[in-house]
């Protein structure tokens, strides 16, 4: 094993349930609720239906179930289908530093293996925390997306380590599992360029599936290539030339702030870096009727938007995947309607004449002032020039410290209730929330899957 793999394996094999303080557990549970909320709300979306049709029904061996339908399939396909649900609304939690991580993309992988292996709730939480730690610490220092690569290997890394914890792989097999997750799953960032397709939301689920598959391969004795990060043709050399990265993994856990405490739980179905601009738009809307705006300057962070601002697709989005990544579109929608919801995206609100007209009044600037603060602090300032010449300014900022200050439990509960209110009755909602709240004392997570049951009819159509 090379140095990077050794550090990851050492972290995974050292982490114990007793290392997770109550605040860490609370943060993890909040993100479970957030993920289940968006998953169930996305159950009938086209990419999810496609993924569900491909999942084989199995009745023997290692079995994990699909959220909603509870159909049994292989753990890797359960991870893929359920991750497709978590990802499709673009409303799961995120962590952005040198690159982008959607750590909840790997959560269904950990759930699938936990169910298949009959893991306890406490062990499942340990696997989840490990999965988040690997993904988020990786993107703190490795600029994968900025070098033209997509997020699939990041999710695969989180999925394989979380799965490996639950499969109790020894260090040697876990090292092979990491290699088997990374080597075949380097993905192109063309996925997030131009008009965005359904695969924008499937690249993460592909990583979840690959990580589970790699972990099971390693358990059965499959070996992977040596030095997957630092070798002559390893990830560092092939993707980054001569640069080598030292992942900031903790040496001790006492007092450590885990990544699961730092990811931002999204409030809107938009790209991570569009969340703060939507909050800024809500502030501006409280000050003025959007119909009175003659011109609107949007200032935000260069790291997030430099390569997008001149793309014609961003200014005239044809797909929801493009719209939820568009800074002028998300700001315009929030200014006019006060929020952005999954229903608005499903109804193609981004194509309506009033939204497009307000987008036409926008210009984007990426000031040095904000660049110096990013990515630790995300900033957006909106300067509206009104039809009478008056100028109004609204600004919103959010930092990593803000993300970590609140475990997010109340937000997770509220989000779950809101997104599933048409899918689950209040009693069913309360049972699932209570189960998650008591997760570390559960002997199995199978009842959690039971509680996601939806009245879906033919679930494979």
Image (spheres, grey):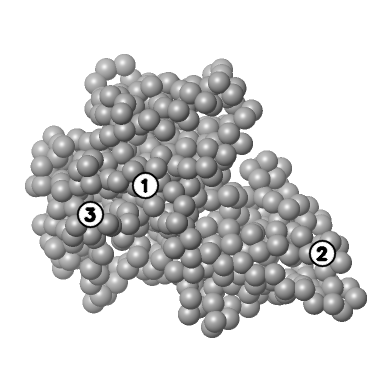
Note whether 31 is above or below 234 in the view shown.
above
Q: Quadrant of the C terminus?
A: top right
Q: Answer whether labels 1 and 3 touch (C-beta < 8 Å).
A: no
Q: Position of residue 200 (x, y in %)?
A: 50, 51
Tell me the mark number nearer the camera, choosing from 2 and 1. 1
The residue singled out by tag 1 in the image is: 23
Secondary structure beneath dot 2 equals: loop
| Residue found at x 31% / y 16% | 59
Q: Which mark is residue 93?
A: none
Instruction: Give whichever of discs 1 and 3 has the lower sequence position.
Output: 1
Q: For label 3, count other residues whose C-alpha is less than 10 Å away and answer few (under 14), some (14-19) or many (20+).
A: some
Q: Is residue 32 left or right of residue 125?
A: right
Closer-to-camera residue (456/206)? 456
The residue singled out by tag 2 in the image is: 288
Note whether 294 is above or below 4 in the view shown.
below
Closer-to-camera residue (38/78)? 38
**Residue 403 in view:** yes
Q: Position of residue 428 (x, y in %)?
A: 53, 22
C-alpha separation, residue under disc 2 versus residue under disc 3: 48 Å
The quarter holding residue 271 reads bottom right
Q: Quadrant of the N terminus?
A: bottom left
Note whether 63 is above or below 365 in the view shown.
above
Q: Which mark is residue 253?
A: 3
């Amino acid at each position: 094993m090379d140095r990077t793999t050794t550090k990851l394996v050492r972290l995974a094999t050292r982490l114990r349930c007793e290392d997770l303080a109550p605040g860490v557990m609370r943060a993890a549970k909040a993100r479970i609720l957030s993920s289940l909320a968006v998953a169930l709300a996305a159950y009938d979306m086209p990419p999810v239906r496609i993924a569900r049709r491909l999942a084989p029904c199995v009745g023997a061996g290692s079995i994990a179930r699909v959220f909603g339908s509870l159909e049994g399939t292989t753990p890797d396909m359960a991870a893929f289908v359920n991750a497709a649900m978590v990802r499709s609304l673009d409303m799961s939690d995120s962590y952005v530093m040198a690159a982008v991580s959607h750590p909840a993309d790997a959560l269904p992988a950990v759930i699938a293996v936990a169910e298949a292996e009959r893991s306890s709730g406490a062990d499942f939480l340990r696997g989840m925390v490990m999965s988040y730690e690997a993904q988020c610490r990786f993107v703190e220092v490795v600029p994968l997306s900025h070098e033209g690569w997509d997020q699939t290997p990041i999710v695969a890394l989180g999925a394989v380590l979380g799965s490996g914890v639950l499969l109790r792989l020894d260090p040697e097999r876990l090292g092979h599992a990491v290699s088997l997750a990374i080597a075949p799953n380097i993905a192109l960032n063309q996925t997030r360029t131009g008009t965005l397709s359904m695969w924008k939301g499937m690249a993460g689920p592909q990583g979840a599936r690959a990580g589970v598959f790699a972990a099971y391969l390693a358990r059965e004795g499959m070996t992977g290539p040596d030095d997957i990060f630092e070798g002559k043709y390893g990830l560092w050399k092939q993707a980054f030339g001569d640069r080598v990265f030292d992942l900031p993994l903790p040496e001790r856990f006492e007092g450590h702030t885990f990544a699961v405490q730092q990811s931002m739980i999204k409030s809107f179905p938009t790209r991570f870096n569009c969340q703060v601009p939507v909050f800024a738009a809500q502030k501006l809307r409280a000050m003025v009727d959007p119909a009175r705006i003659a011109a609107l300057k949007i200032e935000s962070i260069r790291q997030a938007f430099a390569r997008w601002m001149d793309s014609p697709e961003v200014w005239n989005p044809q797909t929801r995947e493009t719209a939820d990544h568009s800074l002028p579109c998300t700001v315009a929608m929030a200014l006019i309607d006060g929020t952005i919801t999954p229903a608005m995206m499903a109804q193609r609100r981004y194509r309506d004449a009033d939204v497009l007209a307000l987008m036409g009044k926008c210009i984007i600037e990426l000031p040095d002032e904000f660049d110096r603060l990013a990515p630790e602090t995300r900033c957006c300032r909106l300067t509206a020039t009104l039809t009478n010449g008056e100028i109004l300014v609204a600004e919103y900022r959010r930092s990593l410290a803000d993300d970590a200050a609140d475990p997010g439990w109340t937000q997770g509960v509220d989000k779950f209730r809101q997104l599933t209110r048409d899918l689950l009755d209040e009693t069913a909602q309360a049972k699932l929330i209570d189960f998650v709240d008591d997760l570390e004392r559960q002997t199995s997570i199978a009842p959690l899957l039971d509680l996601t049951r939806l009245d879906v009819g033919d679930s494979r159509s």
